[in-house]
Image (cartoon, coloured by chain):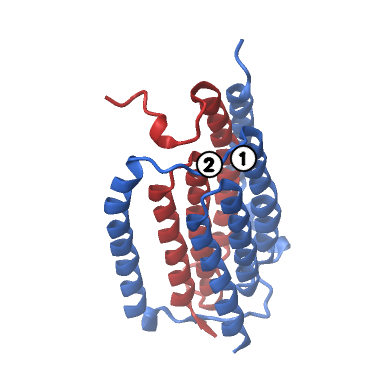
Chain colours: A red, B blue
Amino acid sequence: MVPLSWYLILSGILFALGVLGFLLKRNIITIFMSIELMLNAVNLSFVAFANYWNAHPVADKSIIPLSGQIFVFFVMVVAAAEAAVGLAIIISVFRTRETLNVDRVNLLKL
Amino acid sequence: MVHQVLFIVFGLICVAGAINLLVQRHPISSALSLVVVMGSLALIYLLLGAEFVAAIQLIVYAGAIMVLFVFVIMLLNAGAEERTRGSRTALFVGVPGVVVLAGSVGWMLINGSGRLGSVSISSSNFGETRNIAHLLFKEFLLPFEITSVLILIAIMGAVVLGKREN
């Protein structure tokens, strides 16, 4: 028996580390990887709650316990689409700017 | 007891991989530590009885998406990260913000853990592929079809963006 809050705290730690990487890293690919880390952290709490609601059923039949895992599936689909488009954008930025540092991609800045 | 030991081991591997992602300066090292995080998350999903999710975590995330990342890093010949002026302001604004965020979330969870209850390894096998497929192709059929259109649009967008202009 593991308390549900342990899973949620692990998910929170991973999400905070993802936010930290998003803010601190200067390489555009590593920033993108931090976003993937945040998506993974959210998936962990979805799966933990799916297990929890399966073990603690409620009378309301409109709540499906397994829908947490279905939602993880959709998050993964969106993450795959996002990775394909985002990496294509990174390649096209690198072709025009010749750099991966986000501080050097500042044409829109005043 | 076994559940707790396994959770602590894989959770520690997860957090260590995530910290290594932040510490490493070369993107390829960060990508490989992200693979470690995703692999140990798949094992944690198995502890939670989510077999299908654990399998697609390994196949889609640790397999397909991370191969795409490593491929792009090698294609662009990305070297070690260089320090610039912008990173210092992010350090002074970002780190306190993240500490406040993590602290408040952790405090709320520790305070409310008595009300949340606990999870255990169930023998009911509820996350198996058959149950997921029943839900996915009945109740969630419309969102499933919409995601297939989304994937198609993403493929076309990636092809258009990646095309060399001449």
Q: Chain of mark 2?
A: A
- Residue B98, x across and y down, in percent: 33, 59
* Of A69 and A19, the residue lying toward us: A19
- Residue B59, x across and y down, in percent: 71, 53
- Residue A24, x across and y down, in percent: 39, 49
Residue A39 visible in this rendered orientation of the protein: yes
Q: Callout 2, which amino acid?
A: Ile
- Residue B21, x across and y down, in percent: 52, 56
Q: Quadrant of the N terminus of chain A?
A: bottom right
Residue B148 image label: none
Q: Residue under circle 1?
A: B73
From what the image shows, is residue A33 above or below residue A104?
A: below
Q: Chain of mark 1?
A: B
Q: Is residue A74 left or right of residue A27?
A: right
Residue A29 image label: 2
Q: Are marks 2 and 1 in contact (CB under 8 Å)?
A: yes
From what the image shows, is residue B74 above or below residue A34?
A: above
Q: How many marks?
A: 2
Q: Quadrant of the C terminus of chain A?
A: top left
* Of B73 and A8, the residue lying toward us: B73
